[in-house]
Image: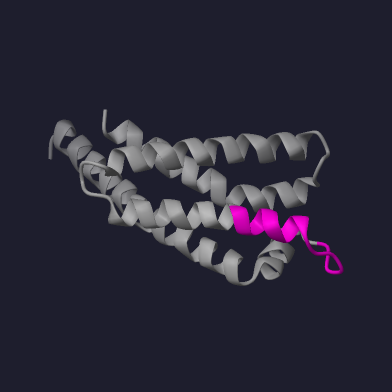
Amino acid sequence: MCETGQKQIRTQSQESKVQHLQATLPWFRIFFGVLGLLTPRLLGRSYGIFDPGGDGPNEVAIRYACIRALGLGVGELTASPEQKRQWNRVGLLVDTVDTIMVLHAGLTGRISKRKALGMLSGSAFGMAVGLLTESQRR
């Protein structure tokens, strides 16, 4: 096989992987959203941001973030093919802002680096998938 043919196969394989990630991301958002709405304390403890004896602000903040994730996931899944790009861009913006905010909080000591790493798992994944999707469309 010629070099051009091998590059085409690699490119198609990469596109297939990105499409798979893009199809998985809305389900991740929905799972995260439902989990946080139903059990905000459990989700908060898993991220290390919930005081076991406390309530109130952390629970509200977790539910707020989960409602947003749920909305993005449902929007991405139900969007028409023409609307998918706009939903991807909104998700990319949200994930980028979340990633920057958590990085800043971790680097400035507002939260521990361990907590920041846990919180970054979702937003950085979403940001990476969004960037890969956008780069494929150009």
- Tag count: 0
Residue 124: % across, % down: 55, 44
The residue positioned farthest toward the right in the image shown: 53
Tell me which corner region of the image, top left, top right, bottom left or bottom right, holds residue 113.
Answer: top right
**Is residue 4 in view from this perspective?**
yes
Q: Is residue 37 above or below residue 14?
A: below
Q: Could you tell whether 53 is left or right of 80 in the image?
A: right
Identified at 51% across, 40% down, the residue is: 94
Residue 39: % across, % down: 64, 71
16 and 91: which is toward the camera = 91
134 and 83: which is toward the camera = 83
Q: Is residue 96 above or below residue 64?
A: above
Tell me which corner region of the image, top left, top right, bottom left or bottom right, holds residue 54.
Answer: bottom right
Tell me which corner region of the image, top left, top right, bottom left or bottom right, holds residue 51.
Answer: bottom right
Residue 114: % across, % down: 76, 51
Identified at 75% across, 40% down, the residue is: 106
The residue positioned farthest toward the top in the image shown: 138
Identified at 42% across, 39% down, the residue is: 90
Q: Which residues are magenta?
A: 51-64
Residue 21: % across, % down: 37, 52
**Is residue 49 in view from this perspective?**
no
Q: Could you tell whether 122 is left or right of 54 in the image?
A: left
Which quadrant, please, contains the N terminus?
Answer: top left
Identified at 58% across, 66% down, the residue is: 37
Indicate yes or no whether the magenta region holds residue 26.
no
